[in-house]
Each structure stands twice: as structure tokens, then as C-alpha cells.
Image (cartoon, coloured by chain):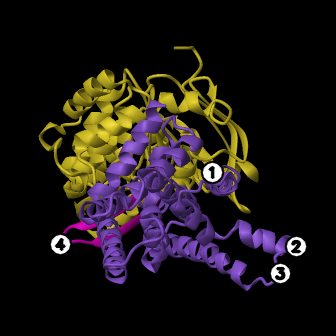
Chain colours: A purple, B yellow
Amino acid sequence: MGTYLTLVRRELGGYFFSLTGYVVIATVLLLLGISFAVMLGAYNGQALDAPLTELFYSTMFFWLIPLISAPVICMRLFALEKFSGTFETLMTTPVSDRQVVGAKFTAGWLFYALTWLPLLACLRIVHNFTTQGTPFDWPVVGTTFAGILLLGALYVAMGCLASAVTRNQIIAAMLSFALGISLFLLSFLKFSVTSQAGWVAKTADYVCLIDHMEDFARGVVDTREVTFYLSFTVLFLFLTLKVVESRRWK
Amino acid sequence: MNDAPMIEVRQLTKRYGRRAAVQDVSFTVGRGEIVGLLGPNGAGKSTTMRVLSCYMPATSGTVRVAGFDVFRQADQVRRHIGYMPENNPLHQDMRVREYLKFRARLKGLGFRRSRARVDVVLEQCGLREVSRRMIGTLSKGYRQRVGLADALVHEPELIILDEPTIGLDPHQIRAVRQLIKDLSPAHTVLISSHILPEIEMTCQRVLILHGGQILAADTTENLQKTMSCGGQVVAELAGPPAELRACFEELDGVERYDVAPAEGDFYRCALTPRPGVDLRPLVYEKAVSRGWRLRELTRTRHSLEDIFVHVTRADREEENP
């Protein structure tokens, strides 16, 4: 446990020692800001019939954040260490592969969560300037964040895998971006499937990230969706672990 | 502490795909020894070290460090080893003290103990004045010392250093060499290098690795003895060249000779002695008896290449007598 925490601390620290971390924070802040401005412009003076968080999520900038930030956050995790050779010094200390993968994932995920914090400030501003009693509930904000974090876990795990298979950070970022986009585009499968019966429709429904997020933003926590995110996160982490272990099979 | 030898390698083979980087290598290293692994680039030094440090498993053969198997008891082995890989990779974005502390914690030292140990190794490696500097801004010599400090921080019994002095200037090389020598009684040290004097000066025993196999394993003294035969003696003499040639012709220990004019009326004579003969006193006596002036008399040092040629030749002769 001690070594795990040491590793998490080091990885998190790495984001703040390098420019990448600040670039990611700034980009996410910009996207959130645009999202906020667009929303304010669109709904200025109108009565709202949906939770505020849902409106936030409905702008496309919302989706750009995990799609772009996760690959950039994760690209350095393994690729940089392999490139600079520090992976060798790391793997010759008494740490297990599992600890390394776990710590890197945790650090990436925590940093991803951190970049989302400005959303709270946006919501707070709206909260302060609305004359109506409560335009949104805090529990709904909670579920929205739960959704964001679950989605983030999946994307960060994917980023870990992409970073573990290469020593080049750019390739890692592109690979995880491609994976992320592909998964996201699967969401649209649902809208093109005409019949609502059959396994295709069911699968399409199951992998529809947009629908999932909509539920979370409305305050609905569906265990099927939670299972979906958790199981895929675990799958990608498992694959990452196997890639890290693979140096022993060669 | 147990009584097992520090390193015990038996028939180690490591293949990358079809190519064998190390083949059937066996050696032992006792506690407290400083052993050099000598060989040209691509001889399998780094591969051997990587297997020893549990970074990669062997294709076949057993390797034990302090009695622990590197494959089955990797965790135990790693605790006993301080390893500095080739090119000494470091986190450029960390400060020296912070990096060492991070490494100490990774190696299982507690909070207080890691702090105390970091202070000790900072002092030991002469890093005190740069302890707050960013590693990325340090000179190569300092970085190398950071790598050494990292290898030492958890007080390992065995220290494995892969080309520790590569790319350093002579002053730095001397400092690193001294540091390694100081480790000797308390730690076992395995160093790799492709520079012979380097190994000669620090190690008590040398393993010569070439093409993935051990060609010679001996103490430095013995190796030098083997090397002294076959070396060249160079003498600069002032005398008629024909007489010089005639003299070398009849001199018993000379296998080959070459007389070439040098500056002034001197001639540069390069003599290859027969095995086991030291030609220098003989040449001196000849010069005195014939009244030639003698300006220089030296035995050329063997380069690593010569030893390889020598050792590989011996190897081949054994195969087809």
C-alpha cells in the first residue's frame, strides 16, 4: 500500500512538474467556459424545464473534454517511462506490476477528475444569479459527477493501455484518441438501428455513452450503466497489466 | 544473511527471438567481491545484468542472487540489489533529494529510515550541494552520482552497475571509481565496462564476455600475466640498422621484429616476444654490450582487442588441437 501511494504521488506530481498538466487544465477550462457561455446565451431569460446539468452536457464541448483530455493525460504514463528508460529502474525495485498499473491509472484518473472541478464553479455561478429558488439539486450534480468520473475511468483505462503498448507518447495519444472516438461513435449506432428488438438494438443500447450520460445528468443512476463502465475499465486495466507483464514472455 | 554466494549463474541463456544474446553462461560471485564484466558492445553484458536484476527472465538456466531465485523470488532478489542500468535513466523533472526519497520509499524503506538513508547517500556521493537542484539541469557527472546514490539508498548487498563511467570526463571517472572502491568490503559489486583499464583499476576479478559466452574468468593479476606474453616491446636504439636486425635475429626470445627509422639517428624497433619472455632486460644488455644508445624501452599495454584476439585464439586451439 505504501509503495502504491508513493507511486500515485509521484505520477500526480509529474503532471504538475510538466507543462502537459497545465495545458490540459487550461484546455478543459476553456471548453467548460465555452460550454457555459453557449448555454447561458441559449437559455437567457427562458424558463427551464430540465436540470441544469443536462443542459451542460447537451453541448458538444462536454464530449470533447473526455475525448481529448484523457488521451493527453494518459499518453505519458507508460510511454514516457519506457522512452526515457526509467521503466527499467522502476521495474527493478520491489514493486509488483499490478501496483504500477494501478498507481498510474489512479493518478491519471485523479488528474482527470481534477480538471472537471471548474464545472462546479460554473454551476455555482448560475445558482447565485437565478432568482428562482433552486434551479437544480445538488444530488443531481452528484450523479452527473459520478457519470463523468465513471466515463473518465473508462477513458483513462483505455489511455493506459494505449500508452503501455508503445514508447512514443504521440502514438499513445493518437491510439487512445482513436479508441475513444470509436467507442463514442458507437453511441450513434443506436439512432441508426430501426428495429427496437433483437440483440443488435440491445447491444447498441448498452454501449450508448450519450444515453448513459443523459441518465446521469438527469439524476438517474442505472446499475447496468455503472456495471458497463466498471467492467470495461477493469478489462482495459487487465489488458494493460498483461502488456506490462509481456516483457517476461518475450 | 545466508552463506550462499552472492551471485550464482548456471547455464544462463537468453534469447531475443532467435538470436541468443547470452548463451550457456555460468559464473559465481562471492560476497564482498568487486567483479568486472568486460566485453565489447553487444557481448551480452547488459542482458546478463538485466536478468540478474529481475527485469527480464532468462530463457533457460538458473540464476540465484543471495540464494534467491531471480524468477520465483523476484521480490526478495530486488530487495537485495541496487541496480543502475546503462545510460542511467532518471526522472528529469524531480529534484535530487526528492528523487532519492521517492526511490527509497519504492524500495520499501519507511518514512524516517528513507530520510536518514537519503542524507547518508547524499553525503557519500558528494551530492549535498546539489540536493535541491532539478536532475534535468545537472551535469552528466552529477547525474551519474545520483544514479549511484539511488543504487545505494536501500543498502543492498549486491550493487550492479552497467557502464557506470561511460561519458564522464577523467576527473569524474576517478571520483566514481573511488566511490566504487569504497563500497567493497560491505557490498558486492558487479560492474560492466568495455574499457579495460577501467576494470583493471577497480575490480579484483574479471569475466570476459564475448558473443554471449564467457571466454575468460580470472583475477586481474592472472589476466595481466596471460596478457604480458604476446605484448610488444618497443625500443628506440641508435645503431646501424643492419646490425640491429642481425642482433634481433639471433636473440632467443624474439618471435618477430620490425626496425623502422625514427627522428635523428635512432631506429624504432618493435619486438614481439615469445610467450613468457620479458625482452626488456635482454634488449638493454645488448645495447650496453654493443655500445648503442638507448632512448626508449617500453612494453606496449594490451588493448582490450588484443586480449580478445588472444582469448578467442586460445579458445579455438582447444577445440581443434
Task: Specify the amino acid type for callout 2.
Answer: Gly
Name the element at disc 3.
loop
Camera-side residue of B270 and B308? B308
Q: Is A17 positioned to the left or the right of B319 in the image?
A: left
Q: Which residues are magenta?
A: B249-273
Circle 3: residue type? Ser
Residue A198 marker = 2
- Residue B263 magenta-highlighted: yes
**Residue B237 vs residue B84: left or right?**
left
Query: Residue at the location (57% across, 22% down)?
Result: B5
Query: Residue at label 4?
Result: B263
Question: Does B233 appear above or below A83?
Answer: above
Mark 4: few/some/many CA within 10 Å (<14, 14-19, 20+): few
Cα distance, mark 1 to mark 2? 35 Å
Cα distance, mark 4 to mark 2?
A: 99 Å
| Quadrant (top left, top right, bottom left, bottom right) of the C terminus of chain A | bottom right
Q: Nearer the viewer, mark 4 or mark 1?
A: 1
Residue type pointed to by label 4: Glu
Which mark identifies residue A241?
1
At 65% across and 44% down in the image, what residue appears?
A: B57
